[in-house]
Image (cartoon, rainbow, N blue to C red):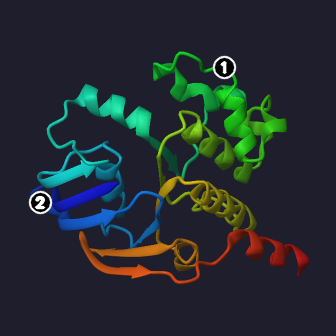
Amino acid sequence: MIELEGVSKTYQKGADVVRALDTVSIIIEEGEFVAVIGPSGSGKSTLMNVIGLLDRPDTGSYRLDGTDVTTFTSDELAVLRNEKIGFVFQSFHLLPKTTARENAELPLIYSDRPNIKGLAQKALEQVGLGDRADHEPSELSGGEQQRVAIARALVNEPELILADEPTGNLDSKSGLEVMAIFQELNRRGKSVVLITHDKDIASMAQRRLQIVDGRIVGDERVAEPTDARSALEQGIAQ
């Protein structure tokens, strides 16, 4: 699904040039659950922005589903991004004074789908919030707000979910609930790429990519990823 070859990205920071990505080459297959782990400033978010078509590499190539997107126009990238990719961020970015259903519906504004009725409710039900659809963010816990954000990412039924530190603002129980949702989505066939600095969160993915100073320095397959649902149930039992 994702093929980056020799991708580099630099930024100007004052008089200095910062190399956020340095000749990164990776392949992520359809249906994989991959965690990208590394310290602050390692290039994790820049990598996600490139994969998510939010930023262009300076050099190298990027093929998404076999299509070279390097030469796409901004408008073409926007259309492809809306069709194929759902984003979840550390900050929930929900609109206040707007219901969970209305927040989940936002990506549909830019969709050319002929029939969008009921898609937001369906997405909320997928994350266990079907009965909270009419509640505003202030009436929801942090974990519930992040689940609304996941529903928003799912509403266009994308093939790829990109999550940047999605548990960073949550307590451990809410974080496990969110990870259980990602694992279930992956079992249903969604590809998931998750950015984190937390090794426990990374242990729940099938594969771990380690990035340091803009370079991929580790690529490990996880034989038995930690099951978030089981960890959650064990914590409740204790």
- Whether residue 13 can be seen here: no
Percent position of residue 169, x then y: 61, 58
Q: Position of residue 112 (x, y in %)?
A: 46, 19
Q: Quadrant of residue 183?
A: bottom right
Q: Amino acid at mark 1?
A: Lys
Circle 2 residue: 17
Circle 2: residue type: Val
Classify residue 104 by image quadrant: top right
Query: Relative to the observer, which residue lies in front, 124 or 166?
Result: 124
Q: Could you give the CA–CA distance between mark 1 and mark 2, rounded to whole angstroms?
A: 48 Å
Residue 10 image point, x, y percent: 15, 56
Height in image: 210 above or below 8? below
Closest to the observer, 178 or 28? 28
236 w.r.t. 174: above or below: below
Q: Is residue 209 left or right of residue 223?
A: left
For mark 1, what is the residue?
117
SS for dot 1: loop
Mark 2 crowdedness (10 Å alpha carbons): few <14, some 14-19, many ≥20: few
